Amino acid sequence: MALLELPVKNKPKKETAPEDALTGTPGTRFSRHLILCLVGLVMLYPLLWLISSSFKPSNDIFRQLGLWPENWDFSNYEQGWTALNQPFHVYLINSLIVVVFSIVGNIFSCALAAYAFARMEFTGRKLFFALMLGTLMLPGHVLLVPQYIIFSQLGWLDTYLPLIVPNFMATNAFFIFLMVQFMKALPRELDDAAQIDGCGPFRTFLRVIMPLCVPAMATTAIFTFISTWNEFFGPLLYIQNQDLYTVPLALRAFMDSEGQSMWGPMFAMSVVSIAPIIGFFIAGQKYLINGIATTGLK
Amino acid sequence: MSVLTKQTHGSAAAPAAQSGGQRRRGNSRRTNQRSGYLFLLPWFIGMLFTIIPFFASLYLAFTDYNLFTEPNFVGLANFQSMFEDPRLLQSLKVTFIYTFVSVPISLAIALLVALVLNRGLSGLSIYRSVYYLPSLLGGSVAIVMLWRYIFGNDGIVNGFLRWFGIQGPAWVTDPEFALSTLIVLNVWTFGSPMVIFLAGLRQVPAMYYEAASIDGASRWRQFRNITLPLISPIIFFNLIMQLIGSFQTFTQGYVMSGGTGGPADSTLFYNLYLYQKGFTEFEMGYASAMAWLLLMIIAIFTAINFIASKFWVFYDN
């Protein structure tokens, strides 16, 4: 157990206000709070409006600017759920499949690569590391056409493989970088102790390093979840079959197929589609905030 | 090197080396080499899928490849026709306006809010979360569609304007205003640079400010002479990342315009046009050339930034 509580560089600082900074009279502090609250309200207003509109009858949506529905109407959810080719849970499951495999792939392949970069000595390590960092800057669209050709030749169009398989090949340098930073902060004595006890490199990695990297893996998992759940371009390119649509494609189909009167159901399904993100955000805030503070991920 | 010595020390110190330990000691260097490459195996395969397409697309940029017939080498023809293609020039214009308006504004707001939050208010983590949440949602289809309705003819923005007796324009369908709605959307996601700024501001040692206020430096002087230089590397980092990101905007333009880039190509982002060329018209040679032009543009802007950074970024070593 003691091992799990080892101090780590990325450990979140205690969330107390810096003492020096409790400046200003109560009046100025109050006005600061007031301004911050107002800005926060403006920021959240679109989201709150979306949620409240999803409970309003379509006719009321644009007539009421207020956030509290005068006539509660849950039929938007029923209608939205069945408005497309497939009931909406099919799209949710499709997205979930892609997300789960992407998370597993990212965590495992990036952790393996990170362990090699953080702990092992081999010829070309510095060069490979620089190459890895270089891919951070590379705009993905440069690789687009040839990758599309490769995937279509493999017969992978209209499957989830083009969306999933790259994640098993440590193609996301951000996460490798994040984990390298994290592993470097772990004391090397742990590896040595494991090796003395007869663990090979793989067992050391699996039994000693991986369990200690749970916070970094959680960050990776949450970021992978959010970006994969939102991902629009990849599915747009590779998925033509409507039954295989992921949630973003399905949402867009709402706009193609439905007339003006379908706002309510569309908003309802929009709420369904962003609810998991907000949920993950609330559950994993600590990891998210630490993650972007160390790597600058979006 | 240090690892190796440590390991040999370790195994030498281990009592009664078993046969396995014996072997490992002898080949420790080679074992480490081999397992290093083994751990990197997925990454090596991934790199293959990066490097080969990288050069393949460079080659395709000089061909007339269209997915159905064999590519023919056409020299610089793609690049020449790019500069005579009005839609390409329009897409560059859209992307540049979007980037150079929204990135400075959102970075300025991010820094400002981070500074206010850093003054030690109770409820910091709540504010931080509220401001950060939109940046997780800004690229999602649901939010871009929502934006269409917020800025629609009868949307809530025009509803608010009507309170003040102003008849707002048709934001989404008027080519003059369509892009500005997406700029607002991008500014709305200032939360992620803000969190990075906040993390940077917390690293500035409090004693600097104490010393400065004993010397009688004003708030503004403290900001100008302490805060700004010390967080300039973070401003630089945010600037680079935001620039690279917004040059590559796709979803916002696609969803806002239903894939066309309209009205009147006013939301035709560069990558949206690239997608249209490559995957609806199947001019893949042309699309590859476009991708390389974008790569060069990004590289040039990043290089300019790195050169300029010598004059304003302060590294405290």
Image (cartoon, grey):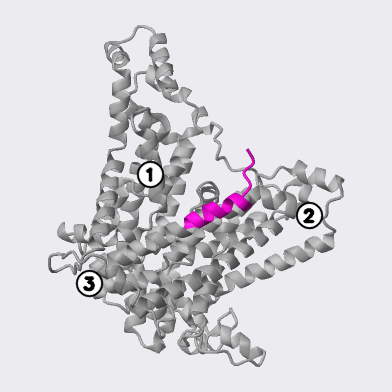
Label 3 sits on a secondary structure element that is: loop
> Which residue is located at x 55 percent, y 49 percent?
A293
Point out residue B22 in the picture as x, y percentages from the top left corner.
29, 11
Disc 1, disc 2: CB below 8 Å?
no
Q: Which of marks 2 and 3 is nearer the N terminus?
A: 2
Q: Residues within 10 Å of mark 2 (few under 14, many from 20)?
A: few
Front-most of residues B84 and A177:
B84
Distance of label 3 from label 1 (alpha carbons): 31 Å
Q: Type of residue at label 3?
A: Phe
Q: Residue A9 has which mark?
A: none
Q: Mark 2 points at which residue?
A: B221
Q: Which residue is drawn at 48% across and 38% down?
A: A182
* Above or below, comparing residue A134 to residue B256 in the picture: above
Mark 1 belongs to chain: A
Q: Which amino acid does label 1 sit on?
A: Met
Labels 3 & 1 near each other (Cβ < 8 A): no
Tell whether B15 sits left or right of B165.
left
Q: Quadrant of residue A24?
A: bottom right
Residue underneath mark 1 = A132
Question: Are tags 1 and 2 found on a single chain?
Answer: no
| Residue denoted by label 3 | B282
State the extent of the magenta-drawn residues as a range. B302-317
Q: Quadrant of residue B43?
A: top left
Where residue B54 sits in the image (x, y, percent)? Answer: 29, 54
- Indicate whether B137 appears above or below A17: below
> Where's residue A252, x and y in %?
35, 75
User: Does residue B242 show up magenta in the picture?
Assistant: no
For label 1, the SS is helix
Q: How far apart are marks 1 and 2 (CA)?
A: 41 Å
Please identify the dominant SS of the magenta region: helix
Q: In the image shown, does A116 or B163 lie closer to the viewer?
A: A116
